[in-house]
Image (tube, grey):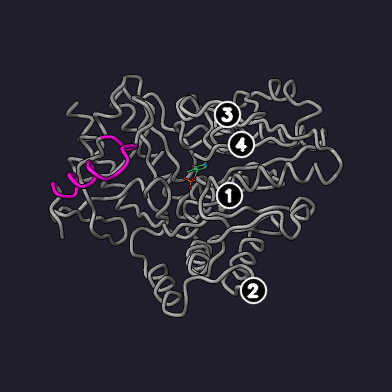
Amino acid sequence: CMKLSEIIQKDQQYYMNTFGNRIPVCFTHGKGLSLWDTEGNEYQDFFAGIAVSALGHSHPAVVNAICEQAQKFIHCSSLYYIEQQAMLAELLVQNSCADRVFFANSGAEANEGAIKLARLYFKKKGFPEKFEIITLEKSFHGRTLATIAATGQDKYQKPYSPLTPKFLKVPINNLEALEKTINGNTCAVMLEPIQGESGVNPTSVEYMKGVRELCSKNGILLIFDEVQCGLGRTGKLFGYQHYGVEPDIFTLAKALAGGFPIGALCAKEFVAAAFEPGDHGSTFGGNPLACNTGYAVLSTIINERLSENAAAMGEYFFDRMTVVTKKYPVIQEVRGKGLMIGIQFNQPIAKELNKKLFEKKYLLGTVGDNILRVLPPLIVTKKDMDGFISVLDEALSEM
Ligand SMILES: *Cc1c(COP(=O)(O)O)cnc(C)c1O
């Protein structure tokens, strides 16, 4: 294979420079939590490609699903019935509060579908003026024009103003602010049960129950963006299951096919019925290869009880981190649910720490200068966790 220096040279010459100076490594293959680079180094993946590689790398269920389906055929238009699409939709419905599903190719695209469905629902009921959507500050909903408007972070929005109008923002865990913002033009509230990209900020149970009540009382829709927190990541199959509330619409993507691109828009029957023939579509969405892979991943998560493993490993991590936190006062807080974890520092050391961990062959992520994100595959074991915690301890002691 090519040398790292050649790959970097080609990237810098030919690829659009939206990623700047990337971490200087190129992986060639993986197995479980391990990834190997062009120089033969082995790394432990505690980021899972931003909560995507739920079953780790090269899991046999994923590899077989892709190979077997690719040998049969990869694509056919949704003009025709697609067995794998029907199977994955059924599996999602049987295991969630949704009655119907529509497949997209990414999280942003699934969220676009949710926004379209919410607007259309009210238009068809005879309320075309109800098209405002209330979202949370510090949220992240994707990179398309509508989803950056839904996103509550300046840095994603600034380059693309004027934004798609009528996305109103309120602070997280503040019911009063939400109640004040709901008005006659509101069609939906859209939020992540646990915010991922802004540094792992969970909503509270009290807040979520209140949001559900406010939505029901005002006859507006509740949309959960579970693109990151869904599919076992938080210790339950879906994030909303921690709260004892059900959304009317929710979206999935990241982990659904273990790294193969797919997104899902899931809804209760009364809302889903607003989509009639011709109202929405996708060339690639719901293709046999993506859906066969999604079916393999979702059934493995369910059958191998990986949500429970995420809960147990998360608990183990939080438990062991209480000792580490006492040792290093620079750790302000360890927060999150299951294996969706953020470590907040009271000094801007996250980037330097992440670099040290990388040198010690551990892959993690950061948010800003103060937060380290820990998102290992759901198949992570106690032994893997012990390995990471001792390396984290070592890296902190060197700083
Ligand atoms: C990653 C993410 C998205 C966007 O998903 P893409 O597949 O990158 O379009 C949307 N919402 C949340 C909560 C995410 O974490």
Q: CA distance from mark 2 to mark 4?
A: 33 Å
Determine whether label 4 and label 1 are within 8 Å by CB: no
Residue under circle 1?
A: 110
Per the image, label 1 sits on a secondary structure element best described as helix
Q: Residue 147, which numbered label?
A: none
Question: Residue 170 at x, y = what percent?
Answer: 63, 24
Q: Position of residue 23 (x, y in %)?
A: 24, 40
Q: Quadrant of residue 147?
A: top right
Q: Quick one: label 4, few (<14), some, or many (20+) residues within 10 Å?
A: many
Q: Quadrant of residue 61?
A: bottom left
Q: Residue furthest front?
A: 14
The residue identified by callout 3 is 163
Relative to 70, does residue 277 appear above or below in the rendering? above
Question: For this view, does 169 lie left or right of residue 392?
Answer: right
Q: Nearer the viewer, residue 277 or 379?
A: 277
Tag nearer the camera, 3 or 2: 3
Q: Which residues are magenta?
A: 5-20
Give the structural element (helix, strand or loop) at label 3. Answer: loop
State which tag comes first along the sequence, 2 or 4.
2
Tell me if mark 3 has few (under 14), some (14-19) or many (20+) residues whose alpha carbon lies within 10 angstroms of its own: some
List the single residue furthest toward the bottom.
72
Residue 115 magenta: no
Identity, as a three-letter code, of the amino acid under mark 3: Leu
Residue under pointer 2: 81
Q: Which residue was labeled with disc 4? A: 191
Q: Are marks 1 and 3 in contact (CB under 8 Å)?
A: no
Place residue 152 in its image quadrant.
top right
